[in-house]
Image (spheres, rainbow, N blue to C red):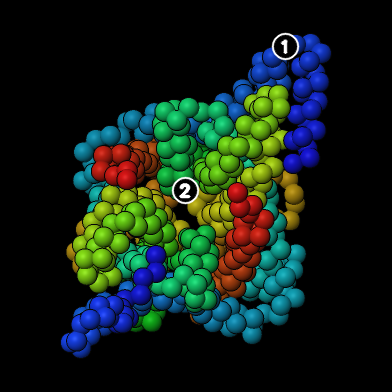
């Protein structure tokens, strides 16, 4: 802290010599303005992104956008029915795969595992690493898994759900662990003192108390999965013109359709893609808002 | 928490009791053993995933290297032949967009973090922090679209009048930077907030103003956490796919001019995966070789970040 000491001494000397407050000198004010700017820079970009996209997609907010399939013949009424339904299906099966596994792993790590054992430390570091693995690599893993399961064509609901579930599993484990850790020790000790086993304590006391936190983390994880396109690209998802009907039906997702249309030269497709982006953003912002609402409404403070 | 699930039978304390000590050992509960086993398996899955990634990448990558010598892979120019195997141009593309992204995201993210941790009132922080984090929620395909149809034509070519290509590293890198601002900001803010109040009070009591306290006391004390935040942002930037695929271009390019299109490693993977290469061909397998390289790079970056935090974190 020698730097701090020196600077503080200089300050005192200067202050004694002129007797003025240094809180409002030009440097401090410039610094504060720079901080303000960096805080609002991202927000400015976000707002201009939304406004620009909304303006260019404004002509296409009609029923066709939701009810039509992608069309090569009539470009001005091309729609995102396949993508929207596909995204919903993918979300449902991703949740089905990732949430139970993620919560189970988090419970084990927080309530049962011995912190000091080498293996569990390894698992912890491993989870941190997995959370930062590029999403396209999870697509490659899903390709291999689908190959092992014996599927020739991998762009089906099951393949997409596996890719997205693998992608968000570390996120769900990490957020669930934080939620479980936030439950005070007294609640567990009270239950254990009354003779409950560790599992009974977890199931009847710890988990119910942690539900708001777990729900928030899970929804945020799913909202990340719904916007992902890179892993689905690896699976070779292509344009489809039908609704998904089983886990083995070929499927596309809203981000995939947006990517596909934005690579087309025709103006109509870009307008449609802009409108679809607004739909996607509304879905994601809705999920984020729900997560924040749950956190603020149900989060207990002990 | 780690609570042992078995209870040791303690010695009876009542000295005058003549009856045999009560059996205090835990009842056997086979159901709970099964549950514990299932939970343990779910935990093991995370390790299985890591090994699965490595196995899924190494197998086709080895097949690729049986066909193509390492020197053709780690090379600046494509050898004449069917497989365009040079990987250095892809690494140049990745490095270029990543540097541009970090040059934007580090000052902006750090500035936002300093404001949130040191200047914002608790009430305004409650609103500002989710707003900044909203940037991380925007899908990368949306950012890619924005970079392609707004940043390049309107901002770069229009407002700034730069002579840039339709796809270029400026647009991809800048938008990528916006995407990782929340990563840098959120983790840096945690690090800054963890600096104990006593250090700030000491500095202020000695007459330093808020800016001096922040820059000379709080920031140095939180440096390891801030470094980890930057490194995590770096690994996000290296691994991001859609923005660079859509707005960064699909040309292998060794030139360092960001106004030209550059294909990055991730863009190469995405573009090749959509191509017509039959599964199992050498061109298709190259995708996994590049994927393996990408995985190793991000893995090393993350390992540096984790160790940096562990080793240099000061416990207050």
Which residue occupies 18% across, 87% down?
Answer: B19
Q: Position of residue A229 (x, y in %)?
A: 42, 55
Residue density around tag 1, few if under 14, some if 14–19, many if 20 or more, within 10 Å:
few
Q: Is residue B110 above or below residue B154?
A: below
Q: Which residue is mark 2?
A: B140
Q: Secondary structure at mark 1?
A: loop
Residue that label 1 marks? A20
CA distance for labels 2 and 1: 50 Å
Toward the viewer: A113 or A27?
Answer: A113
Depth check: give the residue in front, B292 or B282. B292
Q: Is residue B251 above or below residue B72?
A: above
Identified at 21% across, 38% down, the residue is A63
Q: Is residue B11 above or below residue A223?
A: below
Residue sitting at x 66%, y 27%: B204
Question: Are callouts 2 and 1 both on one chain?
Answer: no
Left or right, B251 with reference to A81:
right
* Residue under the image location 63 percent in, 45 percent down: B222
Chain letter, disc 2 residue = B
Can the viewer see residue B152? no
Q: Do the residues under discs 2 and 1 have CB atoms within 8 angstroms?
A: no
Query: For residue A278, what is the image quadrant?
Result: top left
Towards the viewer: A58 or A211: A211
The picture places residue A248, in percent across and down from the top left corner, at 25, 71
């Amino acid at each position: 802290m020698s730097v701090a000491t020196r600077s503080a001494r200089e300050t005192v000397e200067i202050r004694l010599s002129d007797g003025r407050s240094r809180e409002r000198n030009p440097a401090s004010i410039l610094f504060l303005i720079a901080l303000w700017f960096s805080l609002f820079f991202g927000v400015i970009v976000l707002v201009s992104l939304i406004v620009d996209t909304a303006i260019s997609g404004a002509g296409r907010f009609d029923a066709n956008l939701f009810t039509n399939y992608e069309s090569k013949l009539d470009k001005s009424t091309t729609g995102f029915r396949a993508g929207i339904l596909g995204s919903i299906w993918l979300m449902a099966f991703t949740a089905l795969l990732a949430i139970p596994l993620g919560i189970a792993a988090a419970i084990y790590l927080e309530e049962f595992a011995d912190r000091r054992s080498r293996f569990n430390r390894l698992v912890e570091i491993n989870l941190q690493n997995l959370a930062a693995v590029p999403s396209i690599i999870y697509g490659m893993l899903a390709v291999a898994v689908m190959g092992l399961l014996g599927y020739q064509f991998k762009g089906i609901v099951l393949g997409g759900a596996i890719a997205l579930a693998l992608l968000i599993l570390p996120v769900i484990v990490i957020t669930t662990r934080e939620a479980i850790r936030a439950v005070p020790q007294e609640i567990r000790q009270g239950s254990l003192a009354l003779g409950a086993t560790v599992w009974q304590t977890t199931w009847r006391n710890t988990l119910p108390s942690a539900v708001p936190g777990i729900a928030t983390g899970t929804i945020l994880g799913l909202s990340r999965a719904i916007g992902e396109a890179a892993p689905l690209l690896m699976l070779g998802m292509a344009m489809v013109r039908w609704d998904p009907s089983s886990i083995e039906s070929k499927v596309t997702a809203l981000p995939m359709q947006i990517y596909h249309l934005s690579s087309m030269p025709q103006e109509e497709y870009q307008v449609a893609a802009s409108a679809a982006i607004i739909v996607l953003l509304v879905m994601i912002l809705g999920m984020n808002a729900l997560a924040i609402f749950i956190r603020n409404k149900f989060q207990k403070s002990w | 928490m780690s609570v042992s699930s078995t209870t040791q039978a303690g010695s009876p304390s009542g000295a005058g009791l003549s009856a045999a000590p009560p059996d205090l050992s835990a009842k056997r509960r086979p159901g709970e053993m099964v549950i514990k086993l299932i939970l343990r398996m779910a935990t093991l899955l995370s390790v299985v995933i890591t090994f699965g990634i490595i196995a899924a990448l190494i197998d086709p990558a080895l097949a690729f290297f049986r066909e193509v010598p390492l020197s053709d892979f780690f090379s600046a120019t494509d050898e004449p032949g069917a497989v365009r195997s040079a990987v250095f141009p892809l690494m140049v593309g990745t490095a270029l967009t990543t540097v541009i992204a970090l040059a934007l995201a580090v000052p902006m993210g750090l500035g936002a973090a300093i404001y949130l941790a040191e200047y914002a009132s608790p009430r305004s922080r409650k609103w500002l922090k989710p707003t900044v984090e909203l940037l991380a929620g925007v899908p990368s395909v949306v950012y890619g679209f924005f970079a392609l149809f707004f940043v390049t034509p309107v901002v770069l070519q229009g407002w700034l009048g730069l002579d840039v290509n339709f796809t270029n590293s400026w647009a991809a890198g800048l938008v990528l930077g916006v995407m990782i601002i929340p990563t840098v900001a959120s983790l840096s803010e945690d690090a800054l907030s963890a600096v104990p109040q006593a250090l700030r009070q000491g500095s202020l009591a000695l007459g330093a103003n808020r800016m001096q306290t922040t820059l000379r006391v709080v920031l140095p004390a939180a440096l390891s956490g801030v470094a980890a935040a930057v490194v995590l942002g770096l690994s996000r930037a290296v691994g991001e796919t859609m923005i660079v695929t859509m707005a960064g271009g699909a040309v292998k390019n060794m030139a360092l001019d960001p106004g030209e299109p550059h294909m990055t490693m991730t863009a190469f993977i995405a573009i090749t995966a959509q191509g017509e290469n039959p599964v199992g061909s050498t061109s298709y397998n190259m995708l996994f070789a590049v994927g393996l390289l990408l995985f190793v790079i991000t893995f090393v970056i993350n390992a540096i970040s984790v160790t940096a935090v562990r080793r240099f974190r000061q416990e207050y």
